Amino acid sequence: MSIQETFSISELQRMCAMSEYLEESDIHMNDKSISWDGNIIYFKNKKPKVVGNELLIPIQVKGKEFEYFPEGKSIKYSVRVKDLENYLKNGGTIFFVGAIQKGTVSVKMYAKILLPVDLMEIIKGKEDQDSITIELYLLETVKDLEQLCLLFCENKPRQAYITKDMPIPDYDSASQFVVSTLPGKYTDPAIAMVKNPITYLYMKKDDRVIPMLITDLTTAKSGKIWIRIDDKISQSYPVQRIFKKNTTTLLINEAIELIYKENTRQLTINVLESFNKNFYVTYKNAELIVAFANASECWIETLQIEEKEINSIRAGFREEFVKFYERVLRLGELIDKLEISKRLLKTSDVMGSEESLIFLEKALVEKSIVSLPFAKNEECNIYKQIIGKKRLLLEYEKNGEGYVVRKFLEEGQRFVMVVETPEGEKYSVNRWFALRGDDIQNILFDEKMLLNGKRQIFLRIS
């Protein structure tokens, strides 16, 4: 046994001796057992008061010398595949590595639970290798060691029948899921089951608890998030918080991803393709993107993004990217002037209809005499202005060398339906009766006006 392993076993024995639940008497120096160095004895109700209170936890202890102690809370260590297969056959172990600072007797203890679910994931596809590198996590206190041992004892019986060739169960037919994990800083189960370094998932099926062999677990929660950028943006947005092992992503308003990598503390922004999204969503995102492109201060909830971070993210914005969203804002403002709901249009409809929108602004907003975008000789008539796959129903009337154009559903007087009340009063009702069945989904109109018009008709004929 090397001096590093001797130091490591001594440190583990010391930690167990300090615990009210752990006994070190079965941890052996110079143990000749293949793949093991004895057992930690775990007492469910503190150290022995009655027989049968104890559980044995098989352990393997190694040592590794460092010039200086590792700065992070994990280290990596190479383990023989033969040893890993032995652990799997025997139901698992806790693997310890003592980190010893060169020239001292100082030891930091790192550990990893290796239960069958862990071992199946580690060994899969690497059976022919001599060794595999695993990651172990720092035990900062005796309580950390106690919690690790408790988690091992709780989960070892649940995974007892797992073998190397065990088929993956049919998860779709599970009635309930169970999560077993270490206590940690995350109180929300959706986050804890992903972020905690050790998590085991089980499904309940036909009164059995079956281990789930799942890797790369992802969870998500929907909600709202408050964003403030200088004095330009200050409002809440719909958000999906997506959690992975070392990454947290905020998907804001369906398209803007804020991706935070916890191991590197790096924040990046990614914008998803918007052409097929509702134009209202794209417009709201454009407000955010253009404001951020010129921002000096940005807050997300109570977290302030530092100016250095803002500049770093902004440096990745291509010029044509920012110009695209500036154009989205311009066209959105034009659609507002035309009193067309952004929610009725796809982004691709708007971006491909800029000339039509400019024509409509001149005709409907500025009330200018215009030339029609097609050849006509009639004095007056109705036509449908195409915007993407949508149509705006217009009325045009000859005026000198050009035409006056009006929104038919708001100002048109060409078709009239007369209704009579029981009292003999007559009312003219127009606009909405000009809509045909196939128009309803494609014609652009003011939804509130339609509902109000229908209400008025009902009041007059009832």
Image: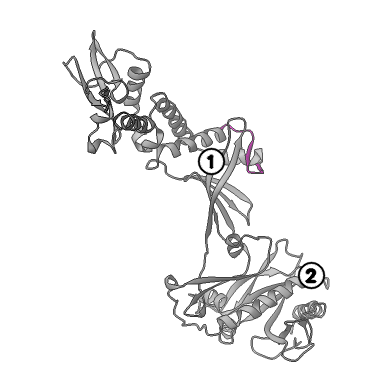
Left or right placement of residue 279 versus residue 65 in this view? left
- Marks 2 & 1, CB-CB < 8 Å contact: no
- As rendered, which of 163 and 1 lies closer to the eye? 163
Residue at numbered disc 1: 316
Residue type of the residue flagged with mark 2? Lys
Q: Alpha-carbon neighbours of circle 2 within 10 Å: few (<14), some, or many (≥20)? A: some
Number of residues whose C-alpha sits closer than 10 Å to that of mark 1, classed few (under 14), some (14–19) or many (20 or more) = few
Q: Which residue is mark 2?
A: 102
Image quadrant in which you'd find residue 30? bottom right
From the viewer's perspective, is 112 left or right of 125? right
Decide: is 151 above or below 387: below
Q: Residue at x 63, y 33 (%)?
A: 296
Say whether disc 2 or disc 1 marks the residue closer to the N-terminus: 2
Residue 13 visible here: yes
Q: Is residue 295 magenta?
A: yes
**Residue 120 horizontal/vertical position (percent):** 52, 77
Mark 2 to mark 1 CA distance (whole Å): 44 Å
